[in-house]
Image (spheres, coloured by chain):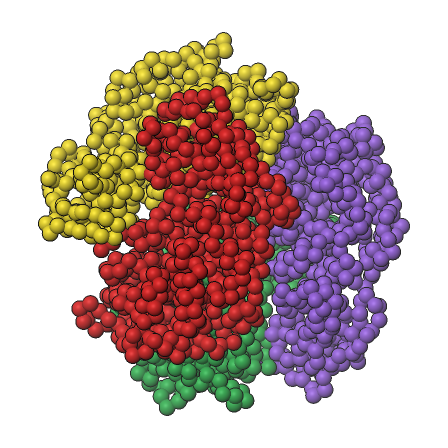
Chain colours: A yellow, B red, C purple, D green
Amino acid sequence: MYSKNDAALTPPMGWNSYDYYNTCVTEEQVRANALFMAENLRQHGWEYIVIDIQWSDENAGTRDEHQYIPFSRFCIDEYSRQIPAPNRFPSSRDGAGFAPLAEYIHSFGLKFGIHIMRGIPRFACHEHLPIKTHDGRKITADMIANPASISKWNPDMYGVNHNADGAQDYYDSLFELYASWGVDFVKVDDICNTNMYPNNPYSAEKEIERISSAIEKCGRPIVLSLSPGPAVIEKAWHLEKYANMWRITDDFWDSWPLLKAMFERCEVWQNHVSPGCWPDCDMLPVGKIGACFKCFGSDEHTTNLTRDEQLTLMNLWCIFRSPLMIGAELTKLDDFTLSLLTNDEVLALTKNPAQAKLVSRSADYAVWVTRSTSSAAVFGDARDSADGVSSGANGGRGVANFYVALFNLSDDPHEVSVSVAEVHRTLFAASSTAPCANATTHARDVTCAEMPATFAVRDLWQHKETSTIKSDEVLSAKLAPHASLLVKITEER
Amino acid sequence: MYSKNDAALTPPMGWNSYDYYNTCVTEEQVRANALFMAENLRQHGWEYIVIDIQWSDENAGTRDEHQYIPFSRFCIDEYSRQIPAPNRFPSSRDGAGFAPLAEYIHSFGLKFGIHIMRGIPRFACHEHLPIKTHDGRKITADMIANPASISKWNPDMYGVNHNADGAQDYYDSLFELYASWGVDFVKVDDICNTNMYPNNPYSAEKEIERISSAIEKCGRPIVLSLSPGPAVIEKAWHLEKYANMWRITDDFWDSWPLLKAMFERCEVWQNHVSPGCWPDCDMLPVGKIGACFKCFGSDEHTTNLTRDEQLTLMNLWCIFRSPLMIGAELTKLDDFTLSLLTNDEVLALTKNPAQAKLVSRSADYAVWVTRSTSSAAVFGDARDSADGVSSGANGGRGVANFYVALFNLSDDPHEVSVSVAEVHRTLFAASSTAPCANATTHARDVTCAEMPATFAVRDLWQHKETSTIKSDEVLSAKLAPHASLLVKITEER
Amino acid sequence: MYSKNDAALTPPMGWNSYDYYNTCVTEEQVRANALFMAENLRQHGWEYIVIDIQWSDENAGTRDEHQYIPFSRFCIDEYSRQIPAPNRFPSSRDGAGFAPLAEYIHSFGLKFGIHIMRGIPRFACHEHLPIKTHDGRKITADMIANPASISKWNPDMYGVNHNADGAQDYYDSLFELYASWGVDFVKVDDICNTNMYPNNPYSAEKEIERISSAIEKCGRPIVLSLSPGPAVIEKAWHLEKYANMWRITDDFWDSWPLLKAMFERCEVWQNHVSPGCWPDCDMLPVGKIGACFKCFGSDEHTTNLTRDEQLTLMNLWCIFRSPLMIGAELTKLDDFTLSLLTNDEVLALTKNPAQAKLVSRSADYAVWVTRSTSSAAVFGDARDSADGVSSGANGGRGVANFYVALFNLSDDPHEVSVSVAEVHRTLFAASSTAPCANATTHARDVTCAEMPATFAVRDLWQHKETSTIKSDEVLSAKLAPHASLLVKITEER
Amino acid sequence: MYSKNDAALTPPMGWNSYDYYNTCVTEEQVRANALFMAENLRQHGWEYIVIDIQWSDENAGTRDEHQYIPFSRFCIDEYSRQIPAPNRFPSSRDGAGFAPLAEYIHSFGLKFGIHIMRGIPRFACHEHLPIKTHDGRKITADMIANPASISKWNPDMYGVNHNADGAQDYYDSLFELYASWGVDFVKVDDICNTNMYPNNPYSAEKEIERISSAIEKCGRPIVLSLSPGPAVIEKAWHLEKYANMWRITDDFWDSWPLLKAMFERCEVWQNHVSPGCWPDCDMLPVGKIGACFKCFGSDEHTTNLTRDEQLTLMNLWCIFRSPLMIGAELTKLDDFTLSLLTNDEVLALTKNPAQAKLVSRSADYAVWVTRSTSSAAVFGDARDSADGVSSGANGGRGVANFYVALFNLSDDPHEVSVSVAEVHRTLFAASSTAPCANATTHARDVTCAEMPATFAVRDLWQHKETSTIKSDEVLSAKLAPHASLLVKITEER
């Protein structure tokens, strides 16, 4: 037994096959990426290896016309559950499923994830094939399917009629199987935003509850990741209750307009980031990607994001604490991309217990800030200790440290700035003044000593302290188009 | 200097003149209600006396045709700031403003609030009247007004052009005046939802920032309350940053459809309730209300809500922790209504530090739950101690107490129920089992002793324990149409 | 070869099996209704006998749980085309299809219609069954189906991918078959509003074009009727180009709110009524209806519309010139309902060549007017002669006759009125004065003689002249709730 | 007395001061443009000279900061009616108003138009100034104004409360004055789409009725033009009843995306074009424009539309029969622009009585067609003779002539084509075959002789016949990006 949130106390970090392999990844390719992660990325916190969509389809490797082949049969077991296509995943033969591959991945101390579509195979319904029930009741696929609930983009499944007798049995049987294979992470698709707007973009709400319950019962902690986005903010509470991560955006790719749009999505979702609950900005389309996308007329290419844009991507994802899933083929990582993914000072932000906050945003810029551990105490804000900041033994006297990210969202060079006072107002909910070095704080009574504090400003990509700043000053940076600055600001004693 | 959130660490409770007096309340009436509160309600936590809209209008007492008189002049000072109409508030004469009345209210240990419309009087703009600037710059009302920014329902003001030179001076001058009067609470209207949907229902966002800044500077903690609703959930983060309470609904009156609709609003906003940040379900239209509404063809009447509906109202507002503002003329309170407003066991919920959660809702029912102090520790959920629950010295062994509210939203008698296990799943984010009496909890490892715990069930309106329930049982109640049950569930040792 | 519009020069009038028989009608029942129509209704203009949905499904008679049985097989021929279920339509055996039944219906001088869903059977796609092509190309159902295009309410079909090779062949093959049976009318469903709002409620636009083309080629005039509504007003031009009638409303049933809502729909569509192009208010749910609707928990009942409401229904449908399809089981018609459907004076309106116009509408009332033949000439408005009004030989001197319908839409008795001058302004586009008896008209120069004209007012339900009115007077009626008055106003010479 | 529609039997053609002069035009400039029109354009059908917004404002010539000066006073008479600013329109002094200028314009056989905002001056309301009533009732501006009804973009007026006593008097008094000046055309602004979407973009509906009634009474035919757009298609019937032209688009300027977007607007409105009823695509921003727009940071410039785009503009506006209002300063017309505006073969389309129809449209192309006079008869479609096509004396044997416009909407060269058969299907509502030279037509029975007809294809910009085409062939053109072809197709005998 476990708590939902314990499965993902910090934002999951890993690799997903989709951005490079689309629907076509093979066991050999998965193993190669796992090996690369074990040797080069694991020490920086990367741990999940996730196989994305269509792993049960034998024809996946040969398709040029369709991304998804309509009216095709894919591999299922005797209970209408998808199993790996044996031609693509040889170790899965003879009923082994993904267990051998999971074992291989686990052998490196890594974790294993898979993608599923919500629902039940359409052909199983039209052929009236059986599902597994916990008590042997005879139920067939058509009896639990909703013929009006389909994906707008994938032809494989009918949604499950959550009220049908057998609906929970079916989902229980899926996760029983996945747990037996050793699956640690499931990305469930066509479930977070079913695009039925405005009628009901969140129409699969009850299937989420069924799946969450199935995970609870399966005896194995499995991270529940929901796609696609954009998630519906009105349902934040429901996502927080039942899932570990959920996409707040439609598919993200290597394009500046999509990256710029993410700033709005993060703004809306900023107050919904907490342990076990991770609004998801989607994968990192860096390095080599897009190899198996002939159906869309494209081929392997290096990310279209500039280096500045890639840094902006990392800075936003990390300060916001999005899950991080690498899209690149790992064995083809160049040095720059590798450096992008292994900066421990930046990745540390994803483990930071505080919730980041937007200071301000326009079409031209954005400023995000967050506290670093133990920063709250100096302002005497006991309520905020929930964010993982414990008051020191010195009676509320802690260290006022924090991170600031400045982003130039415009297409021209731009100076972006924020005052230390405004950072503090944002982080400490309108406590009215700049932080002071010798504060003794009580509710409604903050006394500052006369001398403003001095802070060291450390650039997390240059890995050095680049300046100092006083508590009554303004932090400012001249930024190239689409570029950003990420600094840690630490009080000097 | 103070922190925004310190001005309202718990949901404000008080009386507001609107539901009974509409635009027409007089000083004598305000004093009578303050006296009644001091003598009968203060000991139960009620403290604010708030004068609602149109207090600067001398004609307010005589209007039958309009709620708001278009193109009228109302009372302003030499800086275009509204001042009380002297015929209605005699103590305000000779420049005293609301100071004498505030002093009277403060003398009882109560607090004083006023209503304002955002913006600047239209006639001051058309007459080019001066505003006050901090440095003596000569600026007139028209120079800071936005002629396209008006209320859809009130003809008095133009919105302030937040970019104009003088905009901040103007709002600063308002709150400087209010602080000098001793105002503790300001309800700013036409600012939370300006009804410009879908273009921009939150179009006055920047005026909120100006006002928040003015409060910070004014030297007095003033609760900032924003109206009308519904607030925009996408802007929750902004409201949490700048305001203390904001209406999540359009005007609420004594009608069951409006009360039923509030369950959806509370569902959406449940994860945004915290100290200093209070989503507001609007006033309590109980007792005698509606006296001065001839313009709408109505007159003084007793609330149209049945007693069951009134209890449902109190149960929802209190478990959700909405601000509570009584709409009734206090001096006419009957015994039932008085009992409704003075049930300390129920009102205690508003001081409860935990955030309530919806378990489930349909057209027919709703179930809300929340922890009571120290309930979390037994489940070993250290993260939740932020909600005011401190782990006991016994190594995580606390007491699993909580509140449950069951609501029948249908028009027929209905049995509403919830299992103790589901309550715990909801409160502790999917920790998977019913609470057990002898748990030792670690992350991903909860061991229960074999014996289920037993809880006492206390009905907070009957003021007695009505039953016991075990941790593997279901709490159930047969409820009349629109009725509800509010119980506290305490572990028996 | 024929013109689309020639198939329905006036609004089609007939009987449809749905309102009484739902999905379950049998050949015997159809024949009985046809016989009744031939003997009792044909002389009043009724001519179509239409078999609605699910006629290819053998199980249709036994269903209690579902309206539509998911994942069932229904009857198709060797080209994936639906054929009548032989257990329900015995004469269809041995490949006869609906030809014998059509012949029976034609023998009375009546016409025969059927319902189809757009698209191709889902099971034919999953089983890769063949379709018929004009040149023998081998194409299977899955090759022309769009797996993402389904009905939201019926599980039988996939939409046709209109770009696929074979798409036109398939629809051609359907109408070739229907023409061979002698079908005169096809109601195509899930095609007019596919409920994909706001993305694209008119997403089946290209299938409409395919079907229209198939009808052109089939060699038989077939009325093309599109369902369900509400049709999208932005696409009026497309509907006018390709179809004969289209539903401007969702399913209409015997409820006053639905009837009241139709007044708004008619208002919007009033300028799109012309020969061959009929906005459709849906069936007439009068008499005995609802017999086979156990799946919805209901059973045979007499219409819930009051007699006043039924008259209002007929008055609106007829003056607006909606198609008229009787929902009642004809053999059970009572005298009142029969009289409702056989009032030749009222039904004459559907043959009236002029387009009716709304004068005004509020929540409480509506006033519709239309010209009767030869009314325009007196006002010298040559442009309007297109509406079927020919100028007299007397140099523009015609007869100013028109119809007026007054409707009380409120729940209280209400006097509804309209001036003769306003009727004329509405009908003749702002010609400025009341009609006069001795007008000599030129553009921009109307000279009236001094004497106002006098008109006889004939009540079309009382079948008599009830009053006279002068051209400078007001026509007024005190109407019971939901009642209406329909009069013809004829100039007295 | 006159009919609304007689005021604009064909689409109005003229010049409007806005595109060049913004708010600042003077009498001298108006006179110069009128003179130019009289000498160079009148013989091609151009006749209206329209003074656009802010002619009553004395400060209009000096503004750099605002387009509209908030809280300013402008010139009104003793009845709160705007009068020309005497510094800008010297001939208007001493109560002459626009009468002398109108007389000057009329002296050339041209017509005179002015712009007004709906509503009543705000300052007149705040100052309680009188309006004129027909019977001497004393009513002031504030008594008929709606303080919540303002323009989103212009600060001058309050909307009129149409229910107020005096509302009709006020609008009557305006048009009485305009008629006395000799005004022939009024462009009423902030009335067609008040941008209150989705609540009510057509919220000024009742003011339109008041104004229409005022025009009826004023004794002078005045064209009623409504702005801004986009007009609401659901209200087409209301616009057709009360107005002569209405904007179907927001302000149109010299940008390709705006021009491309017009193809969608014309598609939607195509069935609402008729004598007296003209959906309006807005002005022609050709030649020199934009001179007085410093408030927007721009200055006089030559249109940004390429020559191909300008031809596309003219082709669409003319075949659709939009009103044509030149935006250029006429005295600065270059030869190309002059040729664009004086092509009588193209302008003849605006006088063509048939309604144009879209054949098809995609992101890449559009095809429009319309009949030329007498084209219908050959197809025996008597109903269409309403469009101005009279059957010949030869018993239905006429000439099948029509216009075709092919547009390349893509950014690449593109071949655009349409078959003659499809043209006929579109123009004659699905008569199924290509036109034949020797048809004898009856309803449902068209017999074609064997020989296909031959047509001459005349390019209306080259002014010559460029090819011939047979009735079973396809008309095709290779078009440069954004270019178009406009041809007249005439049967050869």
Between A306 and D491, the one lying in front of the other is: A306
Image vertical order of residue B434 relative to residue B56, above or below = above
Q: Position of residue A457 (x, y in %)?
A: 14, 40
Between A348 and B443, the one lying in front of the other is: B443
Image vertical order of residue A102 relative to residue C247, above or below = above
Would you identify the image quadrant in which residue C53 lies?
A: top right
Q: Position of residue A39 (x, y in %)?
A: 26, 17
Would you identify the image quadrant in which residue C299 lies?
A: top right
For residue B298, side relative to residue B265 (left or right) = right
For residue A255, side relative to residue A342 (left or right) = right
Quadrant where the C terminus of chain B is found in the figure: top left
Q: Residue at x 16, y 37 (%)?
A: A459
Between A37 and B344, the one lying in front of the other is: B344
Q: Residue at x 57, y 15 (%)?
A: A78
Residue positioned most to the top: A94
Quadrant where the N terminus of chain B is found in the figure: bottom left
Q: Residue at x 35, y 79 (%)?
A: D74
Q: Position of residue D53 (x, y in %)?
A: 38, 73
Regarding residue A229, the answer to whether it shows in the image is: no
Q: Position of residue D139 (x, y in %)?
A: 49, 84
Would you identify the image quadrant in which residue B307 lies?
A: bottom right
Residue positioned most to the right: C39
For residue B282, side relative to residue B242 (left or right) = right
Image vertical order of residue D43 relative to residue B172, above or below = below
Regarding residue B43, the answer to whether it shows in the image is: yes
Q: Residue at x 41, y 66 (%)?
A: B35
Give the number of callouts. 0
